[in-house]
Image (tube, helix red, strand yellow):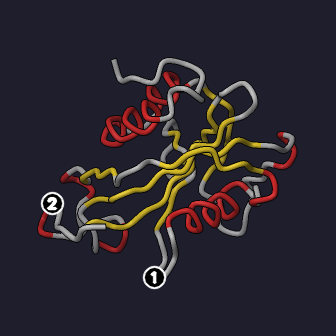
Amino acid sequence: MAESTGPGGLPYRPCAGVVLINAEGLVFAGQRIDMPGAWQMPQGGIDAGEAPREAALRELVEETGVGAEKVEVLAETPGWIRYDLPPELLGKVWKGRYGGQTQKWVLMRFLGDDADIRIDTAHPEFDRWCWMPADALLDNIVPFKRAVYADVLGQFREWVAGEATSG
C-alpha cells in the first residue's frame, strides 16, 4: 500500500471492509448508532502487522458477531480504494489523525442463519441491521462514502443483487 497524504496533509487510515451477502445476493447493512439514517457495511482499521483479509474477518466478528466459520470468502478488491473526509469532519474523527481512508474490501457469502447475526457486541456500532439490494444501500450511505460504495459494489456486481451503480 503506497503511503500518501489526504486532506489537511493528514495520512490515510488503512481500513478493511466486508461486503457480506446472503444466498439471494442481498448485502448486509447496519445503521450506525452515532448517525441515525446512515447505513454502512462492516469496516474498520487494519492493525499493525495484520493482513487486510484478517482485518476484515476480525471486523466482521466485532461488528456483527459472525465468525469465519459462518462465511465463505468469494473475492477481494484488487486494489486499494480511497476516500477523503469532508472538511467538517477533518480533525474530529479518528482522533484527528487521518484525512480519509484507504480501503481493501472482501466479499463474503453468509452461510449462517439470521439469528447468528448479533449486533449487540462488546462495542456496538449498529443499532439496526437488514439485508439490502446494492442500490438501496447506495441510497442510504452517507454521501461522502457513496462513490466508494458504488465502486466496491460495482466490482462485485456479479454476486450482489440490485443495481450496483450510483446512477
Between 146 and 74, the residue placed more toward the observer is 74
Give the residue at mark 1: 48
Q: Residues within 10 Å of mark 1 (few under 14, many from 20)?
A: few
Q: Name the foreground residue: 39 vs 166.
A: 166
Instruction: Quadrant for the C terminus, please.
Output: top left
Q: Position of residue 114 (x, y in %)?
A: 83, 40
Residue type marked 2 = Pro
**In front: label 2 or label 1:** 1
Residue type, label 1: Ala
Numbered tag placed on residue 7 in the rendering: 2
In-front residue for pair 159/65:
159
Report the number of discs. 2
x then y, percent, for residue 36: 52, 41
Would you identify the image quadrant in which residue 138 lies? Answer: top left
Front residue of 92/4: it is 4
* The residue positioned farthest toward the left in the image shown: 9
- Where is residue 19 shown, x and y percent of the image? 57, 43
Question: Residue 161, located in which quarter of the rendered image?
Answer: top right
- Label 2 sits on a secondary structure element that is helix
Q: What residue sits 86% from the left and 41% below the top?
A: 113
Do labels 2 and 1 touch, CB within 8 Å? no
Residue beneath the point at 12% across and 65% down: 8
Q: Secondary structure at mark 1?
A: loop
Residue at 57% x, 52% y is 42
- Residue name at image x 48 percent, y 51 percent: 105
Mark found first going from the N terminus, 2 or 1? 2
Q: Is residue 92 above or below residue 24?
A: below
- Give the Cα distance between marks 2 and 1: 23 Å
